[in-house]
Image: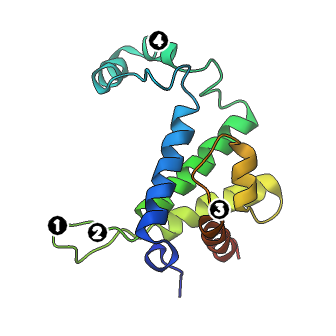
Amino acid sequence: MSTTAKTLLTEEQRGKVQKTVKEIMDSRLLDPSNPPTSKERFQSYGRGRGDILEYYKPNAFDVSRPEVVYGMVWEQYLSYLSIHGLPSNKKGTRHFDTTKKRSVTAKQLANYLERTPTAADLKAAFPTITQLDDKLCKAVNRDLENLTQ
């Protein structure tokens, strides 16, 4: 039996996780108050990334740096955690099950750290995160513990 995010997170905690993902994404921007518009992002896909990169920090997507990849994996884990258990159809009869995807990212974090990751590691990777309270940290720790066993 796998732990589901439905029993793991309350709606308030789910909202905090989503805000945390947004904070992580904003940490890559040079000026978080002036992000690229959706139109600019869409137009940059066909022409390369030159125009859009002026909004981001120079090393924001430098995947040759381990700390950048580590941050991206944390972001991916939190994104999967935030949508786990949400309805995936209009009737609400089916729900997203991201257990396998969360397990893969949790194991990637464990391989990087050479131990079970914790919410303290997340706070250390992103010191500017403001949404993590004690209850949410316990829920994240419990989920990571279950996924890396």
Which numbered marker is on residue 87? 2
Q: Nearer the viewer, mark 4 or mark 2?
A: 2
Do the CB atoms of the residues marked 2 and 1 lie less than 8 Å apart? yes
> Which of pointers 3 and 1 lies earlier in the amino acid sequence?
1
Do the CB atoms of the residues marked 2 and 3 lie less than 8 Å apart? no
Which residue is label 4 attached to?
50
> Which of pointers 4 and 2 lies earlier in the amino acid sequence?
4
Residues under labels 1 and 4: Cα distance?
Answer: 39 Å
Residues under labels 2 and 1: Cα distance?
Answer: 7 Å
Which of the image's four quarters has the C terminus? bottom right
> Which of pointers 3 and 4 lies earlier in the amino acid sequence?
4
User: Residue shown at 52%/33% (left/top)?
Assistant: 26
Amino acid, disc 1: Lys
> Furthest-left residue in view?
91
| Mark 4 surroundings within 10 Å by alpha-carbon count, few (fewer than 14), some (14 through 19), many (20 or more) | few
Which residue is label 3 attached to?
106
